[in-house]
Amino acid sequence: MAVISGAARGQGRSHARLLAAEGADIVAVDLCADIETNEYPLARPEDLAETARLVEKEGRRVITAIADVRDRAALSTAIDTAVSELGRLDIVVANAGICPLTAGLPPQAFADAVDVDLVGVLNLVHASLKHLQAGASIIVIGSNAAFMSSMNTTGIDGGPGGAGYAFAKIAAAHYVNDFALALARSPSG
């Protein structure tokens, strides 16, 4: 079974379809609501339902959960429920993200980008840990922004949201490297 955040459309839906085609049951998680500082519309419940339909079309089971990656307790509940219904968790795909790049957004755009793009990764991975066994995979969807020292060096004025996005992606890349080493050194690895 695979749990995927941001699964209602776009890359998340693509990951769900591919993993289902490869034989995985899917837990599709998405907020299905807008975030005020993010200037483009986010997925809706009908988008998540379409992802579920496409997974079922592959002959796989699917559980959908409308949950916010900023809420670790909600993610834990969704994952616990899915494991009790579908069985072992083998793959975690931390895909949910926002990119509020419009200059002139309020400073809250920085916090929202960090909360979704970094804290959301930590929450999904950490909510999944108790269910993962040796050989499981954790996949964190990154961005070229992880290789920039800041958005300001690109000549792009992404405003507070762009700065938060770049910061979150850089921090998530460091998290992946450091957490992988910690897991490798762990007795339960």
Image (tube, rainbow, N blue to C red):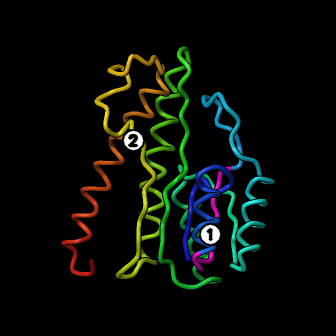
In depth, the one of 138 and 155 nearer the eye is 155
Q: CA distance from mark 2 to mark 1?
A: 24 Å
Amino acid type, callout 2 = Lys
What is the number of the mark on residue 169?
Answer: 2
Query: What percent of the width, then of the height, locates residue 72?
Result: 51, 58
Res. 63 image quadrant: bottom right
Instruction: Count up the numbered dots.
Output: 2
Query: What percent of the width, then of the height, locates residue 21?
Result: 63, 73
Q: Image height check: is 28 above or below 83?
A: above
What is the number of the mark on residue 163?
Answer: none
In the rendered structure, which segment of residues is drawn in magenta? 22-31
Instruction: Residue at 37%, 21% (x, y): give it.
Output: 154
Horizontal side of 77 relative to 188 (left or right) equals right
Q: Image height check: is 35 above or below 158?
A: below
Query: What percent of the width, then of the height, locates residue 40?
Result: 67, 31
**Residue that label 1 marks:** 27
Residue found at the very far right of the displayed protein: 46
Amino acid type, callout 1 = Val
Q: Could you classify mark 1 by the number of other residues whose Cα lies within 10 Å: few (under 14), some (14-19), or many (20 or more)?
A: many
Query: What percent of the width, then of the height, locates residue 135?
Result: 36, 80
Instruction: Residue at 68%, 41% (x, y): give it.
Output: 42
